[in-house]
Image (cartoon, helix red, strand yellow):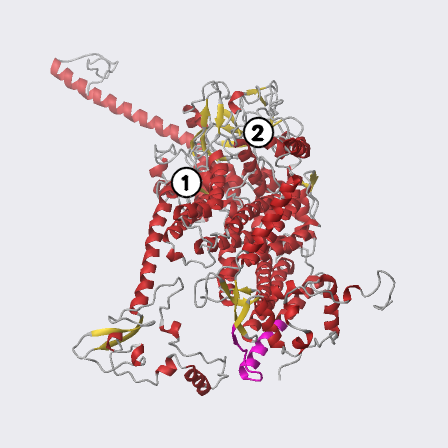
Amino acid sequence: MAARTATAPGAPTTKIGKAAYEFDERMLLTPWLRRTLNKVYPDHWSFLLGEIALYSFLILLLSGTYLTFFFDASMREVVYDGSYAPLRGVEMSAAYDSALSLSFDVRGGLFMRQLHHWAALLFVAAIVVHLLRIFFTGAFRRPRDTNWLIGVVMLVLALLMGVTGYSLPDDLLSGTGLRIISAILLSVPVIGTWAHFAVFNGDFVGEQIIGRFYIVHVLLIPAILLALIGLHLLILVKQKHTQFPGAGRTEHNVVGNRLFPTFAAKATGLIFVVFGVCAALGGLVQINPIWLWGPYNPAQVSAASQPDWYIGFLDGSTRIFPPWDINLPGDYTVPALFWPTVVIAGAMFTLLALYPIIERKLTGDTASHHLLQRPRDVPVRTALGAMGLTFYLWLMVAGGNDVIADKFDISLNAMTWAGRIGVVILPPIAYVITYRICLGLQQHDREVLEHGIETGVIRRLPHGEFIEVHQPLGPVDEHGHGLLAYGGAPVPKRMNHIGGARRAIRGFFRPIEEPAQVELEQRAEGRGLAAAEDRELTTSGRPSEGGRPSEGGRPQEPRD
Amino acid sequence: MSTTNPQSEAALDEGGAATGDPARRARARRRSKQRRRLANVGGLMAALVLTGALYSVFSPAQAADEGSESAAEAAGRDLYERSCITCHGENLEGVNNRGPSLIGVGEAAVYFQVHTGRMPLARQEADAHDKPAVFSDEEIDQLMAYVQANGGGPTLPSGDLRDGDLAEGGELFRLNCASCHNFVGQGGALSSGKSAPSLQDASDLEIYTAMLSGPENMPVFGDNQLTPDEKRAIINYVQTIKAQADPGGAGIGRIGPVGEGLVIWVVGIGALLFGIFWMGSKA
Amino acid sequence: MTTRDTRPGSTGGADVPGELYGGPDDDYTPEQLAAMSREDLDRLGAHYDHVEILHVDAGPEPGSPMEKRAIRQVGMVFAAAGLFAFLFVVVYAGSGWFLPDWHWQVTEGGWSALFTPLLGLLMGLSLLCVGVGLVLFTKKLLPHETAVQDKHDGSHFDRVTTGATFVGAFHNSGLARRKLITRSLLLMGGGVGLMLIMPLGGLIKNPNKGNPLGTTNWAEGVRLVRNDGTPIRPGDQQPGSLETVFPAVPGGNRQADAATMLIRLRPEQVEQLQPRVGHGDFAYGEYVAYSKICTHAGCPVSLYEQETSRILCPCHQSQFDVTQGAKPVFGPATRPLPQLPLDVDDEGFFIARSDYIEAVGPTYWNRERI
């Protein structure tokens, strides 16, 4: 007898039921709520990458709010008189002073600072991994090109958040970066000096920049990001998530778990896992020890000065770009610094944002797609992506070239040359290699579909020939070749993918299931190894000698 | 054997008058010449012996090796002539394309180079790397004495080398040293294969003598540029920073964003990837 | 006051059901719904949301060893999460009270240096346990359901009707033919838009007024001083040394563009000295002074290799040759470091003969025009 609900004709009976009823009287939420609870989300692990970015952002909001209670975004000169002895008596900005006192004089302050900074690094890293997944599976195709554009804009905003954020403490490391930002602004032709004077309120360094970075970092960009994230998720929910091709999956449905309870439980679990990783890093691994760097002084600098990892590619491009000023008539100059900073960054992000349109034009594919593609099935896109990634990674490596030169005893000049030459020749090489690998994987898929899975079982035929037994995946024609077409889903390549292995018996010290019970369940399923053992194998097992569905799937006697 | 004896060739008898026939006169001349020579030599020898005796009687008492060098210097010279002379020359004047002159470098330079094992150089290359010292402390003292005696130069300091203001040392370090050696002395790359070494294993005296002598490509920081007090402040800062713990957890090399980026990708994204493999499905 | 109040505006209210207008409330009466089981209602609602439950793998059998094991696991993980959280609270609140003080001094390596790592470890473990527990619960104890939801692409009906509403209103406004209004609207839009962003003009400053980019605080007769303010004599530095010097003006050592490198060349370097054209007399004997601000991106250049006569910038590895007027010999820099002309005043201290004769620091559009 199924349980009865409390909704008898009329009013609810329990207290909670009554409260819910009253709530809905006012908010009229139930249609939306039921629709939302019933929404189906596919379950693939790679669909959780965007969530990691989202939850890192949440952690940043919370920890960042805490930090604003203690940080003083002022460039007023003060003399340090706090608890860190090696800086006592040193002149510094109030911003740096407040960051030091947060680190040393606030209970748990250093932990929160580090948590915030690690979450920031994780935020951008998760965005990048998520972007790669979207790119390589073709999820950016219509109708999700708008969401892709929003995503690229959010990536740029995340980078800006990072830069404005780590520059706030006004330490020697980030101050050096600030000087370079000043030079980049100056390098823009025609309007560069005007742009610089607008941003810095004059010549470098002025007295405004930290305060301006602060308001950009805690108000302006977070507001835009929140709006964009909301839009990004809204579009995702309305369009429904994409899914990989597979059993029962079409362009017109979504197969997976309903939001409640499964998906919500897992998502909540992921929130805590991400938070846990950030917290663990925030305490166990030191990050941005500003007391070791010292306060910013325009006459001081350290060897091995790098920006945070996500700006590393720009540092690398700046290091390896040759000294090519363009001297125009009239004594105007386009500084060499313009190209590897403004132009390369602009070009990369523009290309990224426009990629869906470019691919549409090149492939002529203007249809809406809700099924994903395996990277191997689109070798050109995958190879282009590998090429772009190689370019980006090589620039990042070039950004750390002095650290690599020092730690691995390589000439610094040689590292610069390696950067220059590598950035030109490595991407095409990556393209070619990736393309060939994709083709190879595609061919293997089709080979398995045609010839079946290699079982590893070797048989010797009566006339002396050795053969390996192959397990066909489906119906075969009269030559023994499989009739299944490739459908875009992963092809099983091992016997345990098609039930050729026993179910594991659970237990830690002792099995908690009876082996006999497990075997009974398996035989009851009617397929798999346990069921197959009931059949005697008397032939070679080759499909051409039997094993066809018309013969009941059992191999026959060999025909001469 | 002819002498320009002012006395004439004419034989002289005891009376001094020339007598006899030519052959007898010649023999007599030869005999008296020999006798005069002997007399001259004997007189000279007598005069010399007399002078020497008088000298040794009346001169003040001298140390055993007066006039050349002390025992340490002599031992130093020995070591030098076995290990250093090939590149630095017989008189410390240097050899073209091999080694610079050591005249005027002083014992501070010798201490730094030899105590850190940079000298003797393993091979001609861009950078002299520190390696286990070849010479013992005593031998280093001897080399120091030898080089100092042959040209002079900056000497070793004395007293507590950390007796300086910690914060001032930090400011001076960041202004003068951090650009090559990094904020906390982790070292850094220089052009074309050279490097500014890490200070993690450097002792107080090694740092002091390095500043004073400006080894290889390091600039020289003379005592009028960085006073001895300022040098002590810098050493205090470096050694304090080296010894201090990392209150924020594992220091990961203290080189900044490069290490942090590696950690977030390998540890952070790595751990989370494992997590989502577990949480989600695979096909 | 009841629903039986008969005053105008008070009777019944919305609790009196209105007309039926379609939707699932028409198809199912409350009595029918009350007769259905909870599971059936769930599937019915899902059906209305175009979701079909394909297959449910029930969780482990109630009372089975599998279920007990899973419950134990999940319970222990949640308990561990709580335990770690409490330990966090103990460490956080107790440090300085019944635990050693958390204030860290530079010389300490004990509890105070472990305070932050402990906080991170405990919070991290606690939160990880919560997350892991939730996922374990989902995987091991919840039924595994496979559901399908139909997608509905854009409704043609909606598009057509919405379009009609929009276009109809536009047509009714007559704007298409009332051109004076549309044109004045354009003027209005342009004007109001400009007006609203005009206050941002307060940010704009003229970079060419007074040429701040091209001048520094160096001037004729200004002494070279160290960071602590002491002036410098020739002879204070050894050959092969570099000292950072500043102009002897108030705040000179905090100016972003005034830092200068005073270098005393060694005799071998003096022999190879090839000053830039027009800079022949800028040196003072074996002393040369160059701007410390890199002409590439503005970092302080400062890595002086006295044997190779190179100054290396640590930011992007530009290298400048001090015997050739600090001209760039490697790396991305394009312009030599500006040279400060030196002299010595009556008391024997170094002075500048004038400001730098070109702009200090990174290149910009009209650098060469000043």
- Position of B235 compared to A474: left or right? right
Element on which disc 2 rests:
helix
* Nearer-the-camera pick, A179 or C5: C5
- The chain carrying label 1 is A
Amino acid marked by disc 1: Thr
Element on which disc 1 rests:
helix
Question: Which residue appears at 33% of the width and 38% of the height?
Answer: B86
Say whether residue A205 is visible.
no
Query: Where's residue A332, x and y in %?
Result: 49, 24
Q: Residues within 10 Å of mark 1 (few under 14, many from 20)?
A: many
- The chain carrying label 2 is A
Residue on which the image places disc 1: A416
- Position of A377 compared to A34: left or right? left
Query: Where's residue A65, x and y in %?
Result: 68, 52
Quarter residue B235 falls in: top right
Please tell me the numbered disc located at residue C278.
none
Query: Where's residue A509, x and y in %?
Result: 50, 81
Question: Which residue appears at 14% of the width and 13% of the height?
Answer: B20
Q: Is residue C77 magenta?
A: yes
Quarter residue A529 falls in: bottom left
Q: Is residue A235 above or below residue B167?
A: below
- Position of C160 compared to C181: left or right? left
- Tell me the quarter of the image containing the C terminus of chain B: bottom left
Q: Which residues are magenta?
A: C54-79
Residue on which the image places disc 2: A193
Q: Are marks 1 and 2 in contact (CB under 8 Å)?
A: no
* Nearer-the-camera pick, A130 or B197: A130
